[in-house]
Image: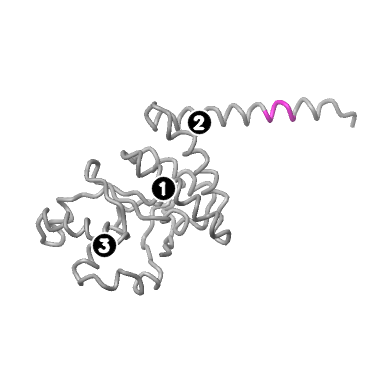
Amino acid sequence: MEYHNGERDKKGEGSMKTNYKCVAFSLWSSVFKTLSNLEKLVYLYLLASPYSRVIGISKVDIDWICFYFHISRTRLLELIRKYQDKKLLVFSEETSEVYFQNYLVLYAQRGGPPVLKTLRREFVLVENRELLRRCIEENRAFMISRPDYYNKTIDEFLKEAEHLLPLEKPLGELILISRQKRKQNCSMRRTIRTKTISHFDF
């Protein structure tokens, strides 16, 4: 499946909030076409709702979806389990989060600082570390198997996430520490560069 981003919200200061989201035609020729109309609608909502995230792991508001589609909680969980059996998503009942395989690589093809900033923010919001582990491993494997989808920004984020994930500290604290180290390294490089230039005889 392929996902594309709409316009960036200028008020978001680099956040990748979108006005619309699209899916590739290939979705309709996959196992997705065997679903009933209701099953398709609910799946598309999970995939491209205003609450879906670039990282590919989104929090599911069970009560709101039940209200929106006029279905019971039991029925919704049955649908989600069906999607999972058909390998359309992975669901964590413990944290009510869904993960779409390779969503990150296929969605965030533009790259750049705004995308990286968004990914770091969303990384902190994910509660299930097992889903994060799958996200890192599967998106990296996909980029290796499909070099045409290689993205420098996503590669940088995956390396950073891979380093932070095994650590025991809260993810928000780890991101803050990582940012401080990057700033220190940048400051050191500028200092070294200034000292080197000052030794040249102009």
| Residues in magenta, as a range | 189-193
Residue 148 has which mark?
none
- In the picture of the structure, the residue carrying the numbered disc 2 is 178
Secondary structure under badge 2? Answer: helix
Mark 1 packing: few (<14 Cα in 10 Å), some, or many (20+)? many
Mark 2 packing: few (<14 Cα in 10 Å), some, or many (20+)? some
Tell which residue pokes out farthest to the right in this image.
201
Q: Earlier in the sequence, mark 1 or mark 2?
A: 1
- In the picture of the structure, the residue carrying the numbered disc 1 is 135
Q: Quadrant of residue 29?
A: bottom left
Q: Quadrant of residue 13?
A: top left
Give yes or no for contact between labels 3 and 2 (Cβ–Cβ under 8 Å). no
Name the residue at 55% across, 44% down. Answer: 156
- In the picture of the structure, the residue carrying the numbered disc 3 is 43
Say which amino acid is labelled 3.
Answer: Tyr
Name the residue at 21% across, 49% down. Answer: 61
Query: Does residue 41 appear to the left or right of 177 in the view shown?
Result: left
x and y, in percent, of residue 107 in the image: 44, 58
Is residue 110 in the magenta section? no
Say which amino acid is labelled 2.
Answer: Ser
Name the residue at 41% across, 41% down. Answer: 121
